[in-house]
């Protein structure tokens, strides 16, 4: 659960950066974080895979 909490915290920070910076880099980093979050779910919860 700790990794999940950390992931959500990082996501919140990145979204805040995206809103403040409004730059392409922030958008790319946010998308990467979302992809990593989905990957984390697949690794920790293999039963959710199709």
Image (cartoon, rainbow, N blue to C red):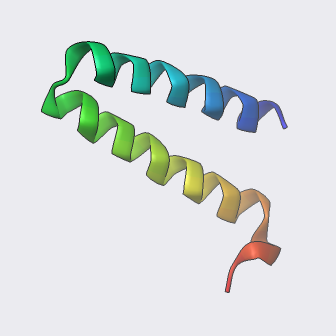
**In the image, is 28 to the left or to the right of 4?**
left
Image quarter of residue 47? bottom right
**In the image, is 30 to the left or to the right of 35?**
left
Q: Which image quadrant: the C terminus?
A: bottom right
Report how many numbered discs are placed on residues in the image. 0
- Where's residue 38, x and y in %? 57, 57
Q: Residue at position x 73%, y 35% from top? A: 3
**In the image, is 7 to the left or to the right of 48?**
left
Q: Residue at position x 28%, y 13% from top? A: 20
Check the image and name the residue furthest to the top: 20
Check the image and name the residue furthest to the left: 24
- Where's residue 11, x and y in %? 52, 31
Q: Residue at position x 62%, y 33% from top? A: 7
Q: Which image quadrant: the N terminus?
A: top right
- Where's residue 48, x and y in %? 76, 74
Q: Nearer the viewer, residue 41 or 14?
A: 14
Image quarter of residue 10? top right
Query: With respect to residue 37, does 50 lie above or below?
Result: below
Q: Residue at position x 63%, y 32% from top? A: 8
- Where's residue 37, x and y in %? 57, 48
Q: Nearer the viewer, residue 12 or 7?
A: 12
Check the image and name the residue furthest to the bottom: 50
């Amino acid at each position: 659960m700790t990794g999940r909490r950390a992931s959500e915290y990082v996501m919140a920070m990145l979204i805040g950066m995206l809103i403040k910076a409004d730059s392409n880099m922030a958008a790319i980093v946010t998308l990467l974080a979302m992809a990593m979050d989905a990957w984390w779910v697949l690794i920790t919860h293999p039963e959710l895979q199709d």
